[in-house]
């Protein structure tokens, strides 16, 4: 008897998608992730739901998969998707021939594509440059990768899966002859179970009949523990977050390839992307000023107001690119975006172990289906995949947005945004019977949502952040980090709440540093003043022996006598 | 007719108001120009003089007991070096006189330690009378009361954190519902108004199966909600919302209802103690004859003689109103527009500047050298601001005065980190007074 039938390593979109798929087929599955969900590439992408048009010239099989999955996700993950639509914009001077190729490619791949004149393009997106020549309208969209990933994990749990975050693989367990994987040795940072600051960690050996390595850019590291080579080629890209939506549709620059060619409207923000540069370590690579500057300067040619607009932070992600050994592509932009299922029995003589590498967020479900089919075949499970038809938790009955102003005592835009995030879970989460004040003003996140997220994820406020968007707006947490931490108490103790606050505040600072000029530097100075001056959080008394008696003890004042119990008898 | 004053002060925060008041009391005809709400409305209302030494070493993390004694040890870049200990003392004397019994702390040179709404203990030189019973050097048992919908202050968590910080008194926290049918997103000022006017609020009796509603005056209703938690506490702390206009009366009512001392834990933004302080200072300025022009930004200036030798004197500042730039003439000008927070200092991707007079602001060329890696690291940006001579005249990059009749005061000054050293209010008061007096002196000469 093993502890689990299948162990999945990696809590990104692919890993969570696999866990859900297998759990729905009745397989006993455990997923381990070293950070919180979306910790790797999934949490560091620009949130584009591809129409496929981006690959319609260079990589048509990927383009066809994208449009297919685009339609599936609109259906099963409606509460994570905003169908903004998108344009591929040709500026004066851009290649006509490429524009025609793009249009033809879209049609060949079954991607709906209409040509817009310059006037039509600018009517749809008034901030587009006057240099627009024409554009192609395609069904690109925006998708919240955090919400999607968490919904997959939640669905997997509903179907009996065990999900362990903050759990790092320390070894791959092999049989005596080193030709079969038997499980994993993992280190729970705190736990097992929900993450809790300050709780002792422990090591656990988890045995399984089959192990799936879904760690993306980290796949080589897990492979190495098992003694197999997985040659992922991590490639970094920068994304710059703007303070508001300068565009309401996805704006792509229609040219063969190049950096800084896309703007994705995402919730309250617009995200500029990106670069493509190979790195040797997916966790340790330079994050540089020129990358940020290039996004703003290049994309200002498409959308000129970006030059003057306020940025709130920047972040970098690494693509888990892969190409079969011997392909030898030098430029990472030329490496295929296709995914590969590496059965290590076939490939390396190591059974019960498969890695999945490459691929794109938009096709995560398809990848999960393929690898789940493969694992089920190995295990002799005959159940069919249901993930293309079965809506995710939150997207089940997402019919009409009601008027939440009356129902929840919230200003209606707050109610509307809550319901957009929670989808069909809205009633469950928001109907607490308690007052439900807003904790995060920028993103309109209420106490009930934050508490729901804490119920799911423990003391990790970054996990609360990705579930709710709290602290992700203009103020970057200056006004709400401490409010979020307050909600941890008294379920968790005082020191855990303060540790969690410090951790979230530092995480917000890390990305905000890349946007420190103009309005956002002013905001950073305000946040610093609020937390250091007003709250004195920079100089806590922790563990120090303060001589309180040496300080001002005040002027003696009279303590008033209590009012007599029976009113009216005072003053005699 | 041209607008003509002796002294024009740009900026309506603590520094600008102090400058205007000092200059007006010295006999000058003063105009104060302010654009938006000042940062007083966001800051806690505490008046810090010097809480910590600027070094990053371990000793800098211990609060300073006597701020006046420590002033002479400060590096020369700190604005206190322009005014000296006596300048700080004189400015506080002015402050004490203006605020009267609304503030305490003047009975001693020592700093007071107060609990912040973030649960830490903070050194400060002057504190609102409404916060006085909350001093952490006081050993009386305390109850902290928070409200379900006032999300910045979690009383039980703050109490627990204070205990773990080693405060010399027992402290408990309780979260209650503010009496009455207020919305979950009711503003602090709405709750404060209810206490000010002691309006009647509906109180539902939860006991018994039927339950009935009665209406009580807000202060009494609040006390009734707190009483079950009192359990012998000799003082009770609330988030700073105990009245916007009559805090002393609200406090007195609650004290007599509860039979315990009552205090506010300063908060912000929005900061009721800060708004009350702004009101006091504005009143004093009006009384001293300061003319106020509010609501429009200063967008530029005019020099006396264009390009001739008089070019180093400012003749007027231009205020934008309905699309037109209106000149405000004066003999002397004081810049008190605030720092990065108040937008008296501005920046873009390539540099940092003072936006009205384009004064020199020392800063590293590379914007990635403007900040430290940690959120509470030693941030160069925190020290951004203009430099002055000992007479508060703004200096250019070469150390010469930019304009012979332009001075600066408050957070627009560089060379110190007010957040780390807790010296922001003291600098605004001391440099505001110095700049105001110097400007008035020149007018009379």
Image (cartoon, rainbow, N blue to C red):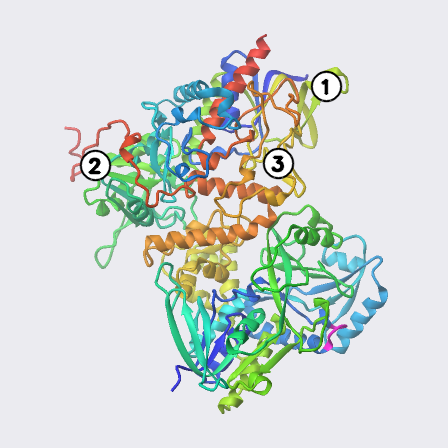
* Label 1 environment density (alpha carbons within 10 Å; few <14, some 14–19, many ≥20): some
Residue identified by numbered label 1: B311
Mark 3 to mark 1 CA distance (whole Å): 26 Å
Q: Is residue A339 above or below residue B58?
A: below
* Label 3 environment density (alpha carbons within 10 Å; few <14, some 14–19, many ≥20): some
Label number found at residue B259: 2
Q: Are marks 3 and 1 in one subunit?
A: yes
Look at the numbered discs 3 and 1 and tell me whether their residues touch, using CB distance below 8 Å: no
Front one among B62 and B343: B62
Q: Are marks 2 and 3 in one subunit?
A: yes
Residue plotted at (40% across, 53% down): A499
Image depth: mark 3 or mark 1 in front = 3
Question: Which chain letter matches label 2?
Answer: B
Image depth: mark 2 or mark 3 in front = 3
- The reply to whether residue B369 is visible in this rendering is yes
| Picture quadrant where residue B297 is located | top right
Q: Earlier in the sequence, mark 2 or mark 3?
A: 2
Magenta range is A56-60
């Amino acid at each position: 008897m093993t502890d689990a039938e299948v162990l999945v390593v990696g809590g990104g979109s692919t890993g969570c998608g696999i866990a859900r798929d297998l759990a729905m087929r009745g397989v006993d599955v455990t997923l381990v992730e070293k950070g919180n969900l979306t910790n790797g590439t999934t949490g560091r992408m620009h949130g584009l739901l591809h129409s496929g048009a981006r690959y319609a010239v260079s990589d048509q099989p990927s383009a066809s998969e994208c449009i297919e999955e685009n339609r599936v996700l609109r259906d099963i993950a409606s509460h994570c998707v905003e169908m903004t639509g998108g344009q591929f914009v040709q500026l004066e001077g851009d290649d006509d021939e490429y524009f025609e190729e793009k249009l033809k490619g879209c049609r060949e791949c079954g991607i709906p594509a209409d040509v817009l004149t310059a006037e039509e393009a600018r009517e749809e997106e008034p901030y587009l440059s006057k240099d627009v020549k024409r554009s192609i309208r395609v069904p690109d969209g925006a998708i919240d990768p955090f919400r999607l990933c968490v919904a997959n994990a939640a669905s997997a749990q509903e179907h009996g899966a065990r999900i362990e975050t903050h759990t790092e693989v320390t070894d791959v367990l092999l049989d005596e002859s080193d030709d079969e994987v038997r499980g994993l040795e993992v280190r729970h940072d705190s736990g097992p179970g929900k993450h809790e600051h300050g709780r002792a960690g422990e090591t656990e050996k988890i045995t399984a009949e089959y192990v799936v390595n879904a760690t993306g850019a980290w796949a080589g590291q897990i492979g190495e523990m098992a003694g197999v080579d997985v040659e992922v080629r991590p490639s970094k890209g920068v994304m710059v977050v703007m303070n508001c939506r300068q565009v309401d549709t996805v704006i792509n620059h229609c040219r063969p390839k190049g950096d800084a060619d896309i703007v994705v409207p995402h919730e309250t923000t617009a995200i500029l992307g990106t670069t493509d540069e190979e790195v040797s370590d997916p966790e340790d690579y330079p994050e540089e000023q020129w990358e940020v500057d290039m996004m703003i300067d290049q994309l200002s040619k498409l959308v000129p107001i970006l030059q003057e607009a306020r940025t709130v932070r920047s972040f970098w992600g690494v693509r888990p690119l892969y190409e079969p050994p011997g392909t030898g592509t030098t430029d990472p932009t030329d490496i295929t975006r296709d995914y590969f299922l590496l059965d290590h029995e076939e490939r390396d003589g190591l059974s019960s172990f498969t890695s999945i590498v490459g691929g794109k967020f938009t096709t995560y479900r398809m990848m999960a289906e393929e690898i789940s089919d493969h694992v089920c075949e190995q295990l002799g499970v005959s159940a069919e995949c249901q993930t293309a038809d079965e809506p995710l938790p939150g997207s089940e009955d997402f019919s009409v947005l009601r008027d939440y102003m009356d129902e929840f005592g919230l200003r209606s835009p707050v109610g509307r945004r809550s319901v957009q995030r929670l989808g069909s879970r809205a009633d469950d989460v928001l109907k607490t019977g308690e007052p439900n004040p807003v904790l995060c003003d920028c993103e309109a996140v209420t106490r009930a949502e934050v508490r729901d997220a804490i119920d799911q994820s423990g003391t990790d406020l970054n996990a609360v952040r990705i579930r709710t968007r709290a602290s992700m707006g203009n103020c970057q947490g200056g006004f709400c980090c401490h409010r979020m931490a307050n909600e941890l108490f008294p379920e968790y103790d005082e020191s855990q709440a303060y540790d969690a606050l410090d951790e979230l505040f530092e995480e917000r600072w890390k990305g905000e540093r890349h946007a420190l000029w103009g309005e956002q530097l002013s905001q950073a100075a305000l946040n610093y003043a609020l937390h250091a001056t007003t709250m004195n959080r920079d100089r806590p008394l922790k563990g120090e022996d303060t001589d309180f008696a040496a300080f001002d003890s005040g002027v003696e004042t009279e303590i008033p006598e209590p009012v007599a119990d029976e009113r009216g008898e005072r003053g005699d | 007719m041209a607008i003509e004053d002796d002294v024009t002060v740009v900026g309506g925060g603590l520094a600008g108001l102090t400058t205007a008041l000092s200059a007006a009391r010295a006999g000058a005809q003063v105009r104060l120009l302010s654009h938006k709400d000042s940062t007083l409305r966001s800051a806690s209302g505490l008046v810090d003089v010097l809480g910590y030494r600027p070094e990053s070493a371990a000793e800098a993390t211990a609060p300073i007991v006597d701020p006046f004694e420590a002033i002479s040890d400060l590096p020369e870049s700190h604005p206190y070096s322009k005014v000296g200990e006596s300048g700080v003392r004189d400015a506080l004397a002015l402050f004490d006189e203006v605020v009267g019994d609304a503030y305490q702390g003047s009975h001693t040179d020592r700093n007071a330690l107060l609990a912040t709404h973030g649960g830490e203990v903070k050194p400060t030189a002057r504190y609102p009378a409404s916060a006085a019973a909350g001093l952490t050097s006081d050993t009386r048992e305390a109850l902290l009361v928070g409200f379900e919908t006032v999300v910045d202050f979690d009383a039980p968590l703050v109490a627990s954190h204070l205990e773990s910080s080693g405060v010399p008194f027992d402290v408990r926290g309780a979260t209650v519902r503010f009496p009455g049918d207020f919305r979950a997103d009711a503003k602090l000022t709405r709750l404060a108004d209810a206490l000010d006017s002691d309006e009647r609020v509906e109180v539902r009796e939860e006991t018994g199966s039927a339950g009935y509603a009665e209406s009580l005056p807000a202060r009494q209703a609040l006390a009734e909600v707190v009483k079950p938690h009192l359990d012998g506490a000799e003082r009770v702390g609330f988030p700073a919302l105990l009245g916007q206009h009559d805090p002393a009366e609200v406090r007195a009512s609650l004290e007599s209802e509860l039979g315990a001392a009552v205090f506010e834990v300063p908060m912000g933004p929005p900061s009721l103690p800060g708004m009350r302080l702004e009101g006091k200072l504005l009143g004093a300025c009006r009384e001293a004859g300061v003319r106020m022009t509010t609501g429009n930004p200063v967008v530029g200036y005019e020099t006396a003689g264009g390009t001739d030798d008089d070019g180093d004197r400012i003749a007027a500042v231009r205020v934008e109103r309905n699309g037109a730039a209106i000149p405000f003439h004066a003999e002397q000008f004081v810049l008190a527009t605030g720092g990065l927070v108040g937008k008296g200092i501005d920046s873009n991707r390539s540099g940092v500047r003072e936006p009205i007079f384009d004064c020199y602001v020392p800063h590293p060329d590379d914007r990635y050298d403007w900040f430290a890696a940690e959120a509470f690291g030693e941030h160069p940006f925190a020290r951004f601001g203009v430099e002055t001579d000992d007479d508060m005249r703004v200096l250019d990059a070469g150390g010469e005065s930019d304009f012979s009749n332009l001075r600066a005061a408050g957070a627009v000054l560089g060379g110190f980190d007010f957040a780390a050293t807790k010296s922001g209010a003291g600098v605004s008061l001391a440099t505001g007074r110095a700049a105001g007096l110097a400007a008035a002196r020149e007018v009379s000469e």
